[in-house]
Image: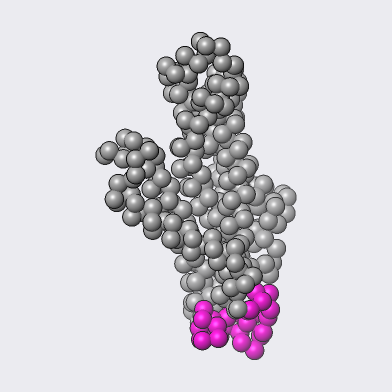
Amino acid sequence: MKLPSRPARRVLLLASLLGLGFCLPALLAPWLAPYDPLALDLTGSLAPPELAHPLGRDEQGADILSRLLHGARISLAVGLITVSITASVGISVGLLAGYAGGGVEQVAMRLVDVLLAFPGLLLAIALVAVLGPGLGNVIIALSALGWTGFARLVRGQVLAVKALDYVQAAHGLGAGHLRLMAVHILPNVMAPALVQASFAIAAAILSEASLSFLGLGVPAGTPSWGAMLAEGRYVLSEAPYVSIFPGLAIMGVVLGFNLLGDALADWLDPKRRLA
């Protein structure tokens, strides 16, 4: 595989730096956070940024930097677990539908069409409202619809790949259906799925922040970027930094994963690489 073009390498480097700037602090939050994110000190309510608290303190006097670092763990967990579930289900459904064709394909794709008729965030809000707030329920709600994008993408790729000569030759030499799907077709449809996964992580993080902002995400008091935004809106005029820093964190992470997906698309797609 050829290396990406110079502009694509620059985008990939920027995306990698943003991703590392998110993942590493999230993993090392218990050691990097200067204070307990749940420790409250009302005497320091809305204290502005200073040396002891570089990002200031929120309305309850909690250190914003510590809450940001621990909130990154929640965003990382939601993004990775949700995409792991949706990618596994969507790739399996798309692979089976594209390869089997006929009635199996029709049923699978009509189910996908029905689910895609619902606005994603509204469906997630409805599911969380029924199941109740909580990290596990947020992941379930986001996974309920997230697999459809993978299914449609992989099904289209499978339809193109299974008609290629080498797949027909393997079938003529006696390769079984399972071997054809697992060995000859699946590896050749994983590149677009990998690009889709990068975009899906960004979407899952943004959706979790939206649910937490509405009070339907993690339990109250748990460090979450969306919940921090919601808390900061009430003091926006007197302490804008309470909302600005979690907002910048969300923007940077979503931008990083979107840039990563775009760079991977340029790298893995020969047509885009030559354009």
Out of 31 and 146, give the one closest to the viewer: 31
Q: Is residue 155 left or right of residue 177?
A: left
Any part of residue 33 in sight: yes
Query: Residue 134 location, x and y as percent?
Result: 70, 57
Residue 41 at x, y percent in the picture: 67, 84
Residue at the spot 68% in from the left edge and 79% down from the top edge:
39
Q: Nearer the viewer, residue 169 or 245?
A: 169
Q: Residue furthest right?
A: 131
Rendered view: 233 above or below 171 = below
User: Is 74 situated above or below 55?
Assistant: above
**In the rendered image, is residue 227 in sight?**
no
At 48% from the left edge and 64% from the top edge, which residue is drawn? 21
The residue positioned 58% from the left and 64% from the top of the image is 26
Residue at the outermost left position: 275
Q: How is the image coloured?
A: one colour
Q: Residue at x 55, y 18 (%)?
A: 101
- Relative depth, front residue between 273 and 105: 273
| Labels in figure, total | 0
Decide if residue 59 is on the left or right side of residue 203: right
Quadrant of the snapshot with the N terminus: top left
Provide residue 196's location: percent of width, then percent of height.
48, 42
Verify whether residue 38 appears in magenta: yes
Position of the C terminus by quadrant? top left
Q: Residue 144 colored magenta?
A: no
Q: Is residue 155 above or below residue 31?
A: above
Main SS of the magenta part reads: loop
Which contiguous range is marked in magenta?
A: 35-62
Residue 74, position as x, y percentages in the image: 62, 60
